[in-house]
Image: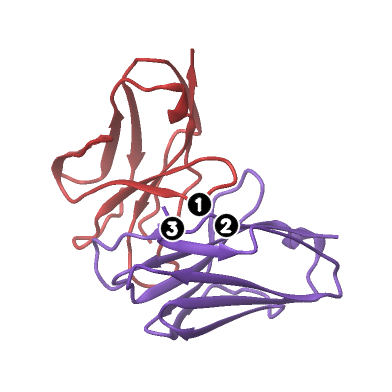
Chain colours: A purple, B red
Amino acid sequence: ETGVTQTPRHLVMGMTNKKSLKCEQHLGHNAMYWYKQSAKKPLELMFVYSLEERVENNSVPSRFSPECPNSSHLFLHLHTLQPEDSALYLCASSQDPGQGADTQYFGPGTRLTVL
Amino acid sequence: LAKTTQPISMDSYEGQEVNITCSHNNIATNDYITWYQQFPSQGPRFIIQGYKTKVTNEVASLFIPADRKSSTLSLPRVSLSDTAVYYCLVLTYGNNRLAFGKGNQVVVIP
């Protein structure tokens, strides 16, 4: 299933590096999401964009900076990360986050390791 | 916040029916109940969604009682490839919405 793609699939970076994660959805959806999933933990919602406007920011540290240039693309810019930021970063999209029946479609994730 | 509560893990033998329950006591009138399946190092995958009574698709069935305070995902005749974490999600719009719970690790044994 290639509805939501993420690149890169794996990323190793040092604490002083700057990198970006990319997500693209091919489903014509209006909303996009970033989640973080640490080992053996549930998904943590980081950011939500609806029609390219950020509608939710769940107390995420400023070293994570999202960007949504259009409804099909979502980026997560990373800088001066910490080792505890190592996790699987998942992108998702949905048609209408304002509706109770809204369903999210997830990408394969980026496995991030911070050294 | 319509939090969800699920058992942490369960084992089942291949070919058996598996029933996974989820409690959502604070579900709101407009909320739907959605179940996802997640394999290791992959994104969750939509399984089924319902509002009330029973919903069935080619993968699973979802049973929701009249009070909607719980739901049960039923996987018929599981195979080894059904080993995964299953999440129950209730969509609540407001602060801390879209909160996934801890999920239920289902292990299918040969």
**Tags 1 and 2 touching, CB below 8 Å:** yes
Which numbered circle lies on residue B55? none
- Alpha carbons under labels 3 and 2: distance apart: 12 Å
In front: label 3 or label 2? 3
Numbered circle sitting on residue A2: 3
Circle 1 marks a residue in which chain? B
Q: Is residue B79 visible?
A: yes
Query: What chain does mark 3 sit on?
Result: A
Residue corresponding to mark 1: B43
Tell me: A69 left or right of B91. Answer: right
Q: Is residue B89 left or right of residue B70?
A: right
Q: Identity of the amino acid at label 3?
A: Thr
Relative vertical location of residue B98 with respect to residue B105 in this rendering, above or below: below
| Residue at x-position 49% and y-position 12% | B110
The image position of residue A102, as x and y in percent, is: 28, 63
| Above or below, B41 relative to A94 | above
Q: Residue at x 37, y 52 (%)?
A: B89
Q: Which residue is mark 2?
A: A109
